[in-house]
């Protein structure tokens, strides 16, 4: 009798446990799955911009390739709400941004950087070259190359590469547009327009004194970050250069004042594969600067003659000011149309040979045209004039 009672008790407790177990199972589905899902849908419906563009067919195919190739195993697409994340990649990801992402590709591991804000951070030629073989432009990268998406070289992308890059180039685009149209946020953007560097007190710098640079350290930094594109000797010859348009600049043919140099590194060159280098310290910038200086001793620049400068000034006024500006500062009336922007000759001075070469060949991939009808004497006169525009005295710590 006693035994039967305890048996009953156990079977009753089993039933209770079973019902409770199943109950909690469904409760957790509702609490952790369904309710957040509904809230997410509501939040997306309330906050997504009405004109949020859906993926085009090309971008959708790119997204499928991104998922199939497992890019998400190494890359997240989610900027977290931490200051570190925001500093590196911009505003934190909001739910509405994933409106068309089902299933989402947020990822959980960051072997490589977050890609949620990749839109227009890199140019297409950068993306193709990197996709073909990341080590062409990022020497120590552990990212695999995807050469099968190309017809034998990085400048011949096949459909999968084009789809994938089209997808990468819109990641975060809606958010960027939204910020640009928001008066408060766009003010923040305009408060620090590209091309100017600001001092500690927030004023726009007009000169810059770099710390004393160390050439040897500079060469090491160069080899880690710059040589893959610009070449070990900074002459613009590298494997990567074959698929980059415009080609990386031959930096041995230019002198820069420190402010111009630091500003270029801070902003990169819009419209080219030249990235912004905001993570370099002032010391590293000074070290690279010091190292580049050692490469410039070979330049053969004839003394500037007054006669040729006068002739050059006239040629310049007739042919060059629409882009390079009346005084050569790169701010001519047509300048705003072009990326990369016309060079500013007040702060960066090309060698005479380089000016001669550019006038014959132009700069493919930019608005700089060739001038095939110009005579050698005219080119020499222009070279003298353009070089005379340099105003190193306006900048401290001048490049020799
Ligand atoms: C084994 C891990 C790994 C895989 C898989 C991988 N990546 Fe990367 N990726 C990296 C690392 C590490 C970097 C940083 C170094 C570099 O730029 O190459 C990177 C950088 C990038 C960048 C540059 C981001 C920036 O602006 O600096 C892009 C774009 C990118 N990867 C796209 C992709 C795509 C698309 C795929 C899939 C086809 C992919 N990655 C697969 C590791 C990976
Ligand atoms: C992914 C390739 C790439 C890497 C890496 C790269 N550059 Fe460049 N860089 C370019 C290209 C392309 C241009 C040419 C832009 C143009 O024609 O306007 C350029 C131009 C420049 C210019 C001249 C810009 C001007 O307007 O006069 C400087 C200075 C420069 N790079 C410095 C550096 C330094 C220093 C590093 C390393 C910290 C570096 N670059 C890394 C591709 C690269
Ligand atoms: C249609 C606009 C335009 C006109 C006209 C123009 N330029 Fe340029 N120029 C540019 C642009 C854009 C660049 C930047 C190229 C780059 O980013 O590599 C440039 C760059 C240059 C460079 C440096 C190129 C290098 O990489 O070594 C020189 C030198 C130059 N221009 C001289 C001239 C002279 C001299 C004239 C007149 C005879 C002239 N330009 C007319 C747009 C123009």
Image: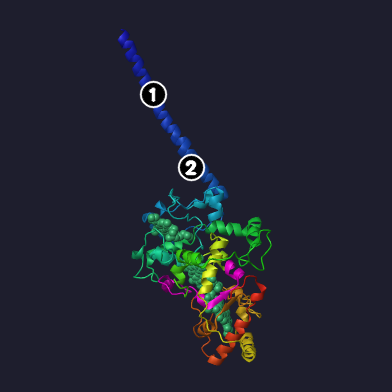
For disc 1, the marked residue is: 17
Please provide percent x and percent y for residue 264.
57, 68
- Choose top left, top right, bottom left or bottom right for residue 389: bottom right
Q: Nearer the viewer, residue 106 or 31?
A: 106
Please provide percent x and percent y for residue 190.
64, 62
Left/right placement of residue 136 relative to residue 206 reads left
Which of the labelled discs sits on residue 7, or is there none?
Answer: none
Q: Is residue 209 one of those drawn in magenta?
A: no
User: Crowding near pointer 1: few (<14 within 10 Å), some, many (20+)?
Assistant: few
Please provide percent x and percent y for residue 168.
46, 60
Which residue is most to the top?
A: 1
Q: Is residue 252 one of those drawn in magenta?
A: yes
Q: In the displayed structure, would residue 208 be above or below residue 184?
A: below
Which of the labelled discs sits on residue 37, or is there none?
Answer: 2
Foreground: disc 2 or disc 1: 1
Q: Nearer the viewer, residue 270 or 397?
A: 397
Magenta-tinted stretch: 236-263
Q: In the displayed structure, would residue 71 be above or below residue 260?
A: above
Left/right placement of residue 9 relative to residue 95 reads left
- Choose top left, top right, bottom left or bottom right for residue 141: bottom left
């Amino acid at each position: 009798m006693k035994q039967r009672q305890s048996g009953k008790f156990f079977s009753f407790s089993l039933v209770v446990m079973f019902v409770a177990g199943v109950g909690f199972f469904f409760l957790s589905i509702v609490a952790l799955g369904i309710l957040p899902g509904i809230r997410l849908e509501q939040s997306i419906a309330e906050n997504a911009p009405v004109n949020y563009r859906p993926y085009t067919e090309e971008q959708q195919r790119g997204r499928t390739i991104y998922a199939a190739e497992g890019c998400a195993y190494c890359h997240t697409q989610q900027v977290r709400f931490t200051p570190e994340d925001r500093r590196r990649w911009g505003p934190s990801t909001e739910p509405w941004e994933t409106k068309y992402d089902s299933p989402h590709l947020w990822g959980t591991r960051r072997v490589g950087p977050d890609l949620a804000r990749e839109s227009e951070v890199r140019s297409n030629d950068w993306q193709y070259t990197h996709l073909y073989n990341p080590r062409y432009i990022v020497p120590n990268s552990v990212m695999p190359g995807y050469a099968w998406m190309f017809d034998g070289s990085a400048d011949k992308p096949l459909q999968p590469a084009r789809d994938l890059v089209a997808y990468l180039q819109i990641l975060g685009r809606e958010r960027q547009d939204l910020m640009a149209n928001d008066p408060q946020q766009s003010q923040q953007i305009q408060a620090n327009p590209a091309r100017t560097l600001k001092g500690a007190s927030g004023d726009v710098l007009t000169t810059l004194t770099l710390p004393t640079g160390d050439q040897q350290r500079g060469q090491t930094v160069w080899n880690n970050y710059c040589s893959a594109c610009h070449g070990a000797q900074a002459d613009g010859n590298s494997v990567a250069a074959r698929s980059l348009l415009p080609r990386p600049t031959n930096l041995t043919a230019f002198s820069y004042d420190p402010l111009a140099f630091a500003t270029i590194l801070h902003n990169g060159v819009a419209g080219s594969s030249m990235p912004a280098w905001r993570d370099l310290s002032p010391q590293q910038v000074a070290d690279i600067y010091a190292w580049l200086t050692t490469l410039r001793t070979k330049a053969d620049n004839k003394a500037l003659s007054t006669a040729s400068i006068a002739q050059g000034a006239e040629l310049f006024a007739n042919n060059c000011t629409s882009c390079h500006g009346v005084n050569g500062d790169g701010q001519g009336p047509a300048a705003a149309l072009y990326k990369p922007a016309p060079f500013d000759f007040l702060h960066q001075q090309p060698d005479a040979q380089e000016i001669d070469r550019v006038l014959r060949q132009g700069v493919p991939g930019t608005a700089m045209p060739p001038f095939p009808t110009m005579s050698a004497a005219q080119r020499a006169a222009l070279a003298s004039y353009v070089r005379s525009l340099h105003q190193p005295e306006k900048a401290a710590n001048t490049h020799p």
